[in-house]
Amino acid sequence: MTLRRLETTRRSFLAGGAGLAAGALAGFPMPALAKNRPVRVGIALPRTGPLALFAEHLPFVMDQVERATKYTVNVGGSDRLVELVIKDTQSSPNRASQVALELILDEGVDVILASGTPETTNPVSDQCELNGMPCLTTEAPLEPYFLGRKGDPAVGFEWTNHFYFSGTQAGGAILEIFGQVETNGVVGALWPNDSDGNTFAQIYPPVLAERGMTLSDPGRFDMPLASYSAAVAKFKADGVEIVHGIIPPPEFTTFYNEAIQQNFIPKVLYAGKTSAFPSALETFGSRAHRLVTEVPWGPQFPYTSPITGQTAAEVVEEYHAASGRQWNSQLGFKLAMFEVLFAGLARIEDLDDPQSVQKAISSISDDTVVGRVDFSKGPFPNTAVTPIAGGQWLEGTDFPLRLAITENTFAPDVAIEAKTLPMLSA
Amino acid sequence: MTDIANVVIQGVLLGGLFAIYALGLSLVFGVLRIVNIAHGDVLVLVAYVALVICDSFSISPFLALLALIPLALLGGFAFQVGVFERVDRRDPLVPMLVAFGFAVVIQNGLLLLFGTNPRKLDAGAIEQLGVSPFPGINVSVLAVMILVIAIVLIAIFQAILYRSRFGIRVRAVSDSEENARLIGVDITATFRKAFMMVMLTVAVGAVLMGIKTNFDPFSGASRLLIAFEVVVIGGLGNLWGTLAAGIVIGLAQMVGASIDVSYQTLAGHLVFLVILLIRPQGLFPKVVG
């Protein structure tokens, strides 16, 4: 009895609801809405977690873009507003994949941007490829991006586009820096048990041997490591004068503190993921002087932003004035991400057709603040390689550290400022 | 020769840190017989409190201890009165589940407040300070300090437990709550005081941990694992055993790492398993008498 009554109620409710929905649709000016609907752009970034350094410039860059464009762009003949939906990947690949899916299914975005190491770009790109969503990513070297996603260089990906420097070129630039300093050629490796560490352990040993350098490798370790003293002891025993590490800032702090305690100061010290970030080095005071790094972008890069019209040096200067914090290369690439996005949006013929959006982005060949981005030329389909220089941190005036360019094999536009100097021993 | 000496010295020093992690757990688990699953997370929580104190007053973490210890004692007291005294301890599973629930709450609360960024307490120049007692061997001043603090704390607590009337009451409660109550021991008061002792070690341990290594909202589990291994190897209820076991695990890690750094963490766990197999009561079971 009760059951039947419930059933009728549910049906009548459903019928009423459908009628209501239909009425609402009919009363709405649909065509006008479709014509001027805003462009929805999803952004997936590691705003918290170990990779949070990659997101710190976003608010500044968004203000810059707003000042220059008011977030209005001409798409297919009519001015449209650009709406940004920003999601935090929490530095986790699983979470990145999940937020990409949320952007696609729940937020109804037209294009997705993602940035900050393969842990962010790869899961987001994979999700976009599966769902036919145009995607633009940066700040992961091309090889771990493309090969890490099991990409076939002959075929490529249909929906995903990526620009950054090439890991091979960056590794080459670091080797050039190693060669500038007089050493015994013994290289100590700090390569952890993660995708980057294992990649270097595979690729680097033959390259080093080719250059007549010998390797001291304590093995792949799991982070966080409670103590690096075993690695330091091995480096000392093997007479290491060059250290090549791929470890994030907190781990580098543990390592370098123990190295200093143990009186181990190599002549050349490089830590990928750390030594490009002055904020991670400042705690070491004068001990941070003469650390070497790759330089994907900096105030010395002779390029201009097509959005704001500022040179790289002017962008850096304004960032310093606005934030009181020191620049790092992420600043340039955050801005370039918007430059490529806007260049792509301006080429779209039909915003409601994802194919048209993807075609517009992949056909870009534009100058940006990080150099020319041309997706037709890259080493892999739909990728673009940007220049990579090398440099060394010296004592600064406005900030504790300042970067000097010492190497430009893969960034010939960037002028060399100094020769790489050996680190100061204790 | 200096290589071997170096491995031994670094291992012993690392053991000091592990003993500090485990000291609080050794008291709760070994003496009070409560399996405190939340121990690692409480350690991390207190480290975050230390971080907030250091950041807001721009003071050294050691100075922050002055404020941190009373806060931790108060927190521990409130927790004991508000939670552990209200749960049924006749079934040991119940307080364990309560602690487990608190571990989850602490982790997610910290995640909400601080995000997943790894943090560190900044103690300044002492972190890099090293001395060289023998040629070829360099010792971290901070690591020596941690070991000395561990030894001093253990000496004090061991004396309290085995040389004071309060210690006798604690051990009586530990042996049999029923019999202790029969001879007129105030169980509730004894538990409260003992739990505050635990929180004192947690405050000191959290600050030392925060200076020596990184922590994030989820690092409690790995700290708990090491603390548990140390307590079990050391033998329940013997605090000197806790120190010895900390050193055993520290040594095992350093010996493993000197073969290949990838064996560092694994070697500690292997030694734990081996000792558990051949001496399940621990290296130094509870002192009798």
Image (cartoon, coloured by chain):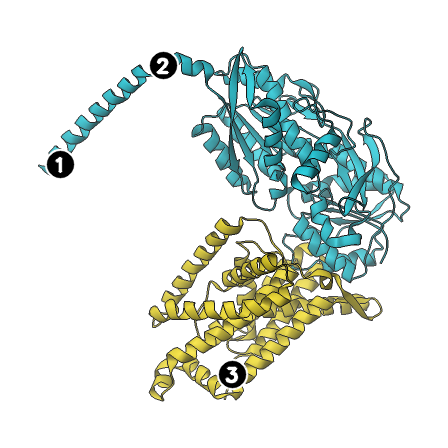
Q: Which of pointers 1 and 3 indicates the residue nearer the eye? A: 3
Is residue B44 visible to us here? Answer: yes
Q: Which of these two is toward me, A372 or B6?
A: A372
Indicate the chain on which mark 1 is placed: A
The residue indicated by pointer 1 is A3
Q: Which of pointers 3 and 2 indicates the residue nearer the eye? A: 2
Is residue A150 visible to us here? Answer: no
Where residue A295 appears, as percent x and y from the top left, is: 76, 36
Relative to A3, residue A21 above or below: above
Q: How crowded is mark 3: few (under 14 residues within 10 Å), some or many (20 or more)?
A: many
Residue type at numbered disc 3:
Leu
Is label 2 in a helix, a strand or a loop? Answer: loop
Q: How crowded is mark 1: few (under 14 residues within 10 Å), some or many (20 or more)?
A: few
Indicate the chain on which mark 2 is placed: A
Is label 1 in a helix, a strand or a loop? Answer: helix
The residue indicated by pointer 3 is B161
Q: Which chain is yellow?
A: B
| Disc ID at residue A29 | 2
Q: Which chain is cyan?
A: A
Quarter of the picture containing the N terminus of chain A is top left
Is label 3 in a helix, a strand or a loop? Answer: helix
Going 17% across and 26% down the picture, which residue do you hit?
A: A12
* Same subunit: marks 3 and 2: no
Q: Distance between the residues labelled 2 and 1?
A: 42 Å
Q: How many labels does the image show?
A: 3
Mark 2 or 1, nearer chain start: 1
Quarter of the picture containing the C terminus of chain A is bottom right
Where residue A189 appears, as percent x and y from the top left, is: 76, 49
Going 44% across and 55% down the picture, which residue do you hit?
A: B104
